[in-house]
Amino acid sequence: MNRYQIFAFLVFFILAPIKTITAQGLSQQVVTTSGEGNTEKDAINDALVMAVAQVRGLSISSKEVIALKDIIHNQKLTSNVEYKNEIKTLTRGIVSSYEVLETGKSNLTSKIRVTIKSVIPVYTAGPQLSRLRLAVIPLKISSQISDKASSEGYAQNWMSSLEEGLVQSRRFAMLDRSFTDATNKELSQYAEGQFPTIELARLGQRAGTDYIVTGELRHYSVIDKSIINPLSGQKIAKSALNAEISLRLIDVATGQVKFAKSFTNSEIAVLDIINAIYPLGIVSVSDSEVIIGSGGEQIKVGDKFRVISLGLELKDPYSGENLGRLESQIGEVQILEVQSKTSRAKILSGTDLINQKFPSGLILRPPIKNISTAPSPAPKKIRINSDDEW
């Protein structure tokens, strides 16, 4: 590996997020650093390395420092202007430009000491990456399914619908694992110098996922339910699909299965995943209506939810593990209006308790069949797992 290849390797692996000041996530950060050397150029090299390390937020190994200094030091340059331009070229955008502010001698080492002001491109992803990160991975197809072509298409469409629902919930940072070839091809153009040098700050910014959503298509069959028209004798083609997907949420770091359930409907799967991790919450109460901090296609006008007040934390007496919090059902609401981020609902029962207990936090749970909206002497107590385990 030659010097240029070593430094190209450095470009890809020392990038780290910095607070952005532009809508596109790209900005130029100005830093002031000092360096020492036997010559002024050596001192500038040292200061440039420190500037890169400071902005990227990562320490540069001694081997990489030597490589960077060696690349710049061995250039045969005849003027200061040429030297500055060559540094910008060699660092491939890591240092856009620099200016020497002060030159002198160190009292301790007797070496030349310089202070420089460097301009370094940085990139910051949006605040959404602070959310729990999920990636949807293609399903496995059971070996017992004979129609591989149709079942694979069905599984792909099912998981695409699941991913769309999770994205629209705005609860997670959804990471793509289906179109990596396209994004890799786009990023390769930055490294090849086809864009302005500031764009190189985008390299090395790929985010890792906390959990993957995957599973297996266990059952898939199309049942022929065609009938014969008794008047004409003509066959009327009809069919019914029998399919079941076993879905899992897996902690990537530990391999622990955090959620597992079988589904036939992707919309129900979206709701169950959200309710298992981030239950719908009430963010505002106004007399007979509430505002729910979630919207999108996962919630529909007319849907009913139970209003839950959270109580004491429950712990396993042997392991000390958090078992969740005691839940008290205090009322019921029905969705009136759905927007992209919020929903509005009217209170069907429990108006006084909902207004009273709202400051301490209220969540929503899907309705239970045959649940009565009439007030009861005491709220029903339910044990659940809380999102503390996540």
Image: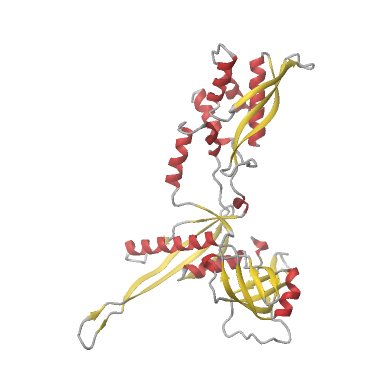
| Residue in the picture at 60% in, 52% down | 128
Total count of labels: 0
Is 187 displayed left or right of 352 in the figure?
left
Q: Nearer the viewer, residue 109 or 121?
A: 121
| Residue in the picture at 31% in, 79% down | 225
Q: Nearer the viewer, residue 383 or 280?
A: 280
Is 26 displayed left or right of 157 in the figure?
right
Locate residue 189: give its quadrant: top left
User: Where does the C terminus fall, quadrant-wise?
Assistant: bottom right
Give the image location of residue 195, x and y in percent.
48, 34
Q: Nearer the viewer, residue 5 or 113?
A: 113
Give the image location of residue 282, x and y in percent.
66, 69
Q: How is the image coloured?
A: secondary structure
Say whether residue 59 is visible: no
341 in relation to 129, above or below: below
Locate residue 387: give its quadrant: bottom right
Give the image location of residue 135, x and y in percent.
52, 55
Give the image location of residue 235, x and y in percent.
23, 80
Question: Which residue in the rendered view is the most extreme toward the right?
Answer: 107
71 in relation to 321, above or below: above
Say whether residue 219 is visible: yes
